[in-house]
Amino acid sequence: MREAYHEQLDHLAGALAVMCDMVAVAMEKATRSLLEADLALAEEVIGEDQAVDDERAKCEEHALALLALQSPVATDLRVVIAALHAAESLERMGDLAQHVAKTARRRHPQPVLPEQVRGTFAEMGRVAVHLARRAEQVIRTKDIDIARQMEDEDDAMDDLHKHLFSVLMDREWPHGTAAAVDVTLLGRFYERFADHSVSVARRMVFVVTGKMPGAEV
Amino acid sequence: MREAYHEQLDHLAGALAVMCDMVAVAMEKATRSLLEADLALAEEVIGEDQAVDDERAKCEEHALALLALQSPVATDLRVVIAALHAAESLERMGDLAQHVAKTARRRHPQPVLPEQVRGTFAEMGRVAVHLARRAEQVIRTKDIDIARQMEDEDDAMDDLHKHLFSVLMDREWPHGTAAAVDVTLLGRFYERFADHSVSVARRMVFVVTGKMPGAEV
């Protein structure tokens, strides 16, 4: 029984790792489509989001099968529920990458970003993709120290987000309201993506170790 | 066994209805704090969000107990998982109400909203609170037609949101970038709150009927 449980849990964790990879790729491409006003790439991201949703449905099926066949209790049960919540966060991360791509598409062939904030978004994209990859590593390596480090890395995203607001709020913002609206929403998409990455990693620590991460993780 | 399952499921549904009520109240107060620049009310909403999080934890415990003690399978199992997801959405709705209140607090004693969009936000607040109340009704009355009607009511929120963007994008927006940033984010908070309400209602249809709502719901 325990062996079957662990085998099925490994399948479930594997499906979550696949989702991490998918949303990391989506956010990497979405950021590129944004920075380079690349319509084809934006369309690609938008079209590929369905695959993320399908993978999430697969995770739910894995989890349901596990619950129905193994009837886990106590920690084993909590672990499966944590995996279900992680899958929901990952689907949301896919949506957020899609929102970035849709913003690039909406303004095409105009670039969305004023030159002044391009560098900040390049960096936010880099951090976002990195965090999704780190969550994947937590799953694949069961190295829970990675999840700990991610908290600091997410602080970098918060700093970038704050910097963005300081640029927007500056009286000298010369790019008009429409650009400000786009930049505001995009900033939020990246920040939410990063938050979800950290949440996924925390849950995966629990999934791979059966121990709830401490408040410091 | 079936009887115990249904009894425990009723407890779980009851806890979700309590969460609907809490987030409806939170959003109603948050909107008032925003429209009236009422700092005390904003603080109240911010302070009360913990109670929503606690209630969500209670829902999770109900669901875990149900899974552990009854080991439901097939539809019964899916119903419990749907309730867990609904609880997560409701916690998020509480967060969004808190975000509105925090925006009101951040700008106090200045009002956040230019006169031009006050009416729109009053209406968005009204629709948001109404939708949360409707989700509660679905749970309490098991009347699934309500969930169907909510789709139309959510369209009203989308229209308000679009109107907001048209006002923001107007070349004549005279209120500066900082106000545009606030209005953009606030618009998004209300729209997400409404989306989550509809998602909760759809899941509750499943919880109270055991049937997945059709694509049209």
Image (tube, coloured by chain):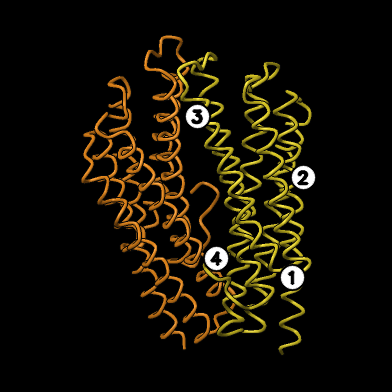
Chain colours: A orange, B yellow
Q: Determine the CA span between mark 3 and mark 4.
A: 29 Å
SS for tag 2? helix
Specify the subunit that label 1 lies on.
Answer: B
Specify the subunit that label 4 lies on.
Answer: B
Q: Determine the CA span between mark 3 and mark 2.
A: 29 Å
Q: Is residue B87 left or right of residue A79?
A: right
Choose mark 1 or mark 4, whichever is in front: 4
Q: What amino acid is found at the position of numbered circle 3 in the picture?
A: Ser
Write down the residue under mark 3: B166
Write down the residue under mark 2: B25
Q: Is residue B21 left or right of residue A166?
A: right
Instruction: Establish if B29 lies above or below A98.
Output: above
Specify the subunit that label 2 lies on.
Answer: B
Q: Determine the CA span between mark 4 and mark 2.
A: 29 Å
SS for tag 4? loop
Write down the residue under mark 1: B142
| Marks 1, 4 in one chain | yes
User: Where residue B115 sits in the image (x, y, percent)?
Assistant: 66, 19
Q: Which mark is residue A175?
A: none
Q: Which mark is residue B216?
A: 4
Callout 1–callout 3 Cβ contact below 8 Å: no
Choose mark 4 or mark 2, whichever is in front: 4
Q: Earlier in the sequence, mark 1 or mark 4?
A: 1
Q: Determine the CA span between mark 1 and mark 3.
A: 38 Å
Point out the image quarter for the C terminus of chain B.
bottom right
